[in-house]
Image: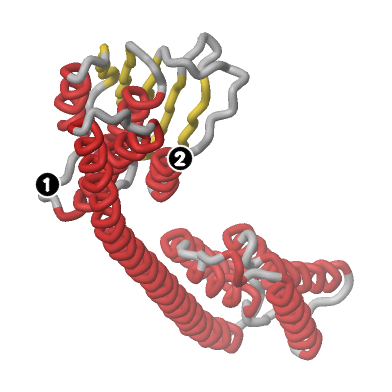
Amino acid sequence: MNKGRFAVPAKGTDWSIAVGVAALLLGSGLSGPHPSGGREVLGLALLAAGALALAARRQAPLVVLAVAGLSAVGYQAAGFEVLAVSYLVAVYSAVRAGHRTVTLAASGGLLAALLFTALVSPGGPVREDITQARTTLEIAWLIAAFAAGEAVRQAERRADEAERTREETARRWADEERLRIARELHDSLTHQISVIKVQSEVAVHVARRRGEQVPEALLAIQEAGREASRELRATLEALRDDDITPPYGLDHIPQLVKQFQVSGLQAALMIEGHPQAVSAAVGRTAYRIVQESLTNVSRHAAATTASVLIDHRPGTLAIRVDDDGKAMPDSVPTPGFGLLGMHERVTALGGRLRTAPRSTGGFTVQAELPTSGAS
């Protein structure tokens, strides 16, 4: 249930209801048949206590239900023939909070206790008729309070579900728009960089055919164009991943590690725990974390070895990628788009990501992805 509904104004409303019910019960008790002496004081105190407890009906609905029920039995046993209004309000609040079974059981016990109290109290046939009528009225009011609480609870649940659906739809539209913009930007950059790459290679080729010395700046442009083209191809593959059926997941990680082994990186894969089925989103994120980590190792870390650990824990999929690169403990890594992308993917699933240099040298990427309830 949305906690925002129970703000300060709601507390003020609850206190107003509690004080109003207390005044109603005290007025009804004093205006009708009631005992005198100590029983009168006890009955009035129970009337007030059961009503004032309603101020906490949102925070502790079951506690308020118990207090209101016991006070109703107490003041009727003391001799006050007053309808259990405070208990009806408590029933409404408890059902609204979702405690239907407990409320039904408590209400059945209360009705039995009130009936027993009325039967053992002194009185003649007239009192028995009044008791039966009052019992019927109390049952009717209990049913009405229960139905009202259930109706409000269902309405609030539908409202929460509608709000959640709107948020998910808006987030999906935003993700689709970001993906569309990224693809358009990729296509535009690919064309421009391809032109630069072709022109630089032609210039280098012409200079070498003429026996001229190729300027270092031109060679740097040529190499930068090649590297940018490789990066864009990798980016395009990631952007098109959403259209792949089935998407890359945990089952593809061994093949991914072998690809980097073929390229010259001494990469090792270890799997621990009891493998469990995970959602497509979790599997795809795990694959991308390993892919991006090994890509950074092979291109930027100047590392010779890397280890990948996939640990299946209860409710969690843990991923760790370590390398023996040049990163030092006191160095501050510059977050690139790859690390930012990993962080966004992990955060979207409610997981945690840690990227930092290792104390013994090299770099580590650690991620924990929740698998419980994933779909």
Tell me the amino acid under the disc marked 2: Gly
Q: Nearer the viewer, residue 108 or 331?
A: 331
Q: In the figure, 103 relative to 264: above or below? A: below
Residue 23 pos. (x, y %): 79, 83
Disc nearer the start of the sequence (1/2): 1
Which disc number belongs to residue 39? none
Q: In the figure, 354 relative to 233: above or below? A: above
Please tell me whether mark 1 or mark 2 is closer to you in this view.
2
How many C-alpha atoms fall within 10 Å of the one at disc 1: few (<14), some, or many (≥20)? Answer: few
Q: Residue furthest right?
A: 37
**Left or right: where 99 falls relative to 273:** right
Residue 285 pos. (x, y %): 30, 41
Q: Is residue 109 visible?
A: yes
Q: Residue at x 62, y 77 (%)?
A: 84
Q: Secondary structure at mark 1?
A: loop
How many C-alpha atoms fall within 10 Å of the one at disc 2: few (<14), some, or many (≥20)? Answer: few
Q: In the figure, 173 relative to 365: above or below? A: below
Tell me the amino acid under the disc marked 1: Pro
**Left or right: where 240 falls relative to 311:** left
Q: Residue at x 38, y 65 (%)?
A: 171
Q: Residue furthest top?
A: 360
Residue 5 pos. (x, y %): 60, 72
Q: Nearer the viewer, residue 332 or 360?
A: 332
Q: Secondary structure at mark 2?
A: loop
Q: Residue at x 62, y 19 (%)?
A: 330
Please say if the residues under marks 1 and 2 sit with CB atoms less than 8 Å apart. no
Q: Give the labeled residue for mark 1.
A: 246
Q: Nearer the viewer, residue 261 or 46?
A: 261
Q: Give the labeled residue for mark 2.
A: 336
Q: Residue at x 86, y 70 (%)?
A: 41
Q: How many marks?
A: 2
